[in-house]
């Protein structure tokens, strides 16, 4: 019975996260959503800046701290290991929902705007390409494990999870973090860069760089010299042909 409950919890977390991520795409691009980076109730720019920075910091702390190995060791004493990742996904959905709801657009002159049709089309194409890279990267590194479904299914079927293995499939042979490359590409590839969107893009870019530092520290601890060689031979965010 507990395995079945864990499974439905994991599925619900996965569906909720997909919905949150789809909204995040629209939120970041002002596309088809009621509230976004530039759409919503405004406030004095200093107040808006403080609120938005706080929301991004909240996301960064949750997303980084809960992903650390030390936190996971402590957290799995509180929740069953099978739902640890699903709970992480739920927490991510919560902080994203807070970001969507409380984000305050910043009233300020537009930083830059591309008006030529070719330029606009190119930037929106890069925006879409970025999110496609994100999606593809999740499947390359095991989409269902990343979002917690593999763990709850293993508990339901009473199967042991496979040991973590170091692999470099497809894109990972040329860049260590293609998922983050996709996010950066989508954040910055917009034809109209408002002050609020610039804050959003810059804030999340800083978070990505900080998150990479913590993530690579964990991977070095887990895979040792093999990952150290990988770092030496493959670029972090800029493609470099692997010699592995």
Image (spheres, rainbow, N blue to C red):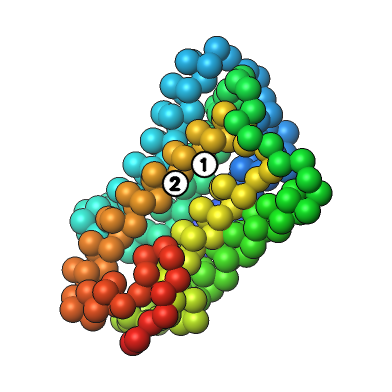
Relative side of 71 to 54, left or right: left
Instruction: Provide residue 64's location: percent of width, then percent of height.
Output: 34, 49
Which residue is at the front of the view, 80 or 144? 144
Which residue is at the front of the view, 99 or 46? 46
The residue lying at 49 percent from left, 60 percent from top is 181
The residue lying at 69 percent from left, 37 percent from top is 113
The residue lying at 54 percent from left, 60 percent from top is 182
Which quadrant would residue 151 be assigned to in this image? bottom left
Which quadrant would residue 172 be assigned to in this image? bottom left
Q: Which residue is mark 1?
A: 201
Residue 10 appears in the figure: no
Question: Badge 1 local density, few (<14 within 10 Å), some, or many (20+)?
Answer: many
Q: Which residue is mark 2?
A: 205
Relative side of 17 to 236, left or right: right
**In the image, is residue 102 above or below residue 25?**
above
Quarter in which the C terminus is drawn: bottom left
Q: Contact (CB < 8 A) between labels 2 and 1?
A: yes
Furthest toward the top, the residue is 44
Furthest toward the bottom, the residue is 244
The residue lying at 49 percent from left, 76 percent from top is 171
């Amino acid at each position: 019975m507990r395995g079945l409950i864990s499974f439905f919890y994991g599925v619900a977390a996965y569906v909720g996260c997909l919905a949150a991520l789809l909204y995040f795409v629209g939120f970041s691009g002002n596309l088809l959503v009621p509230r976004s980076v530039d759409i919503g109730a405004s406030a004095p720019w200093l107040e808006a800046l403080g609120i938005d920075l706080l929301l991004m910091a909240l996301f960064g702390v949750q997303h980084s701290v809960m992903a650390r190995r030390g936190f996971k060791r402590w957290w799995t004493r509180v929740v069953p290991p099978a739902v640890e990742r699903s709970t992480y996904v739920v927490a991510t959905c919560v902080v994203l929902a807070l970001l969507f709801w409380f984000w305050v657009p910043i009233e300020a002159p537009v930083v830059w705007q591309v008006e030529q049709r070719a330029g606009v089309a190119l930037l929106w194409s890069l925006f879409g390409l970025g999110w496609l890279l994100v999606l593809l990267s999740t499947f390359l590194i095991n989409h269902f494990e990343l979002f917690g479904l593999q763990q709850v299914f293993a508990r339901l079927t009473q199967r042991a999870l496979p040991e973590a293995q170091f692999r470099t499939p497809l894109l990972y042979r040329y860049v260590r973090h293609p998922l983050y490359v996709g996010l950066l590409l989508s954040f910055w590839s917009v034809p109209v860069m408002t002050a609020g969107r610039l804050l959003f893009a810059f804030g999340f870019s800083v978070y990505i760089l900080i998150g990479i530092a913590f993530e690579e520290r964990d991977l070095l601890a887990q895979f040792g010299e093999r990952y150290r060689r990988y770092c030496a031979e493959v670029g972090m965010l800029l493609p470099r042909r692997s010699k592995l």
